[in-house]
Amino acid sequence: NAGVTQTPKFRILKIGQSMTLQCTQDMNHNYMYWYRQDPGMGLKLIYYSVGAGITDKGEVPNGYNVSRSTTEDFPLRLELAAPSQTSVYFCASSYSTSSHYGYTFGSGTRLTVV
Amino acid sequence: DQQVKQNSPSLSVQEGRISILNCDYTNSMFDYFLWYKKYPAEGPTFLISISSIKDKNEDGRFTVFLNKSAKHLSLHIVPSQPGDSAVYFCAATSDISNFGNEKLTFGTGTRLTIIP
């Protein structure tokens, strides 16, 4: 059981380049999220999805796009990379059990835009 | 507008002593709170949670206390161990009855260092 898998782990982009951050989960969770973590700023929600074909903006969506064609995959697209997008990006899916509700996070993608 | 605040960016505690991490929130609609632990180069992992119908939840060395009137929660780790050195995030959400449709709001994190 792999959980939430993110690729790549590290990437350096030049200003204006584009890239896609991949996220896959094998737990059949409907709800998935993209967060970014900046130093001293905690985790900010970029986009989320409540199921295949349904996505919505979070707190900081500008400069990003997402798609959700399957339950498993939730890629995050950066079209024109800017230095302000230098951050660590985390994908997560949500679950609930009899004892608690929470997120399972991927290990993150560290992106540097130069 | 930081709805979940962790005012201490860092905390150092001697091994074996108690670690107390604090978190304040402003949104009175929050009714479910979680603590996540994060090691470098890894994603956050779930540690412990508490519903607003309780004021305390315990799991081994970890206890979370909730003071709804003060909009404050704290995480106690007793005894502290070197492996507890990590960044701890407080998170909150509302409408937990709508399972799966809750977005977590995270605090800025506290870096805990356990001194051997």
Image (spheres, coloured by chain):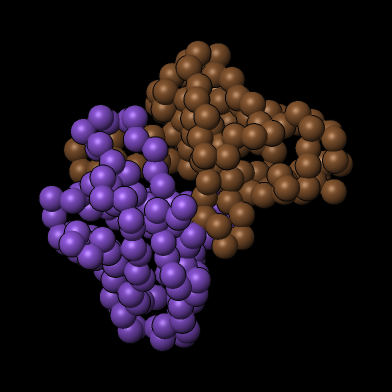
Chain colours: A brown, B purple
Up-down: is B32 above or below B14?
Answer: above
For the point 28% across and 75% down, which residue is it?
A: B78
Residue B64 seen anywhere in this rendered image of the structure: no
Up-down: is A68 above or below A113?
Answer: above
Left or right: A86 in relation to B29: right
For the point 39% across and 43% down, which residue is it?
A: B104
Which picture quadrant has residue B25? bottom left
Give the camera-side residue of B88 and B67.
Answer: B67
Give the camera-side residue of B22 and B82.
Answer: B22
Q: Position of residue A43 (x, y in %)?
A: 52, 50
Give the camera-side residue of B91 and B43.
Answer: B91
Q: Position of residue A50 (x, y in %)?
A: 42, 23
Up-down: is B70 above or below A108?
Answer: below
Residue B90 seen anywhere in this rendered image of the structure: yes
Q: Position of residue B46 (x, y in %)?
A: 38, 51
Left or right: A47 in relation to A95: right
